[in-house]
Amino acid sequence: MINKLFKSVIDQDNAPIVICDVHSKVVYMNPASVKRYKKDITGMSIKDCHNGESNQKIDRVLAWFAKDRENNKVYTFHSERENKDVYMIALRDGAGELIGYYEKHEYRDKETSDTYDI
């Protein structure tokens, strides 16, 4: 039941979420990420979608994540066009071991809906 709840949280998020293992293999994409990137690359390496410089940055962040269990979040860039900050977030098991990572998009636009507008 818990896994279904976690999957639902990720699937309902409007922001793209691409989850990778420690080898940068894509293990899950939520519907928003498939829509944004226009294809599902589950099972492929995320590095196949990036240039050499970006792949070096991914490797550098993964090494930093692995270095210390307290190293869990890295700011990677800001998009003026979309008014968002993007982070790489470490994923760890119950013992604190690094098991993967994902990219987190934090949008800065103010919500335009009325509260409890149902």
Image: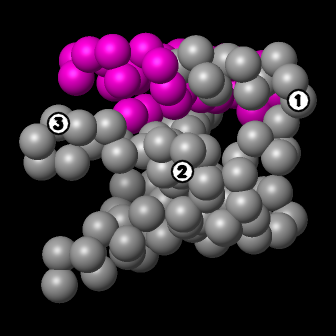
Residue 73: name its quadrant: top left
SS for callout 3:
loop
Q: Position of residue 74 (x, y in %)?
A: 48, 18
Q: Position of residue 65 (x, y in %)?
A: 39, 22
The alpha-carbon separation of the residues under discs 3 and 2 comes to 17 Å
Residue 90: name its quadrant: top left
Q: Is residue 68 magenta?
A: yes
Q: Amino acid at mark 1?
A: Asn
For marks 1 and 3, the one nearer the N-term is 1
Residue depicted at x 77% and y 23%? 54
Task: Count neighbours of disc 1 (C-alpha within 10 A) and say few if under 14, some if 14 to 19, many if 20 or more.
Answer: few
Q: Position of residue 35 (x, y in %)?
A: 77, 66
In the figure, 67 relative to 86: above or below? above
For marks 1 and 2, the one nearer the N-term is 2
Q: Which residue is mark 1?
A: 51
Q: Position of residue 44 (x, y in %)?
A: 72, 61
Comparing 90 with 36, the one in front is: 90
SS for callout 2:
strand
Disc number placed over residue 96 in the picture, else none: 3
For marks 3 and 2, the one nearer the N-term is 2
Task: Count neighbours of disc 3 (C-alpha within 10 A) and say few if under 14, some if 14 to 19, many if 20 or more.
Answer: few
Q: Is residue 2 left or right of residue 73?
A: left
- Span highlighted in magenta in the image: 62-90
Residue 85 visible: no
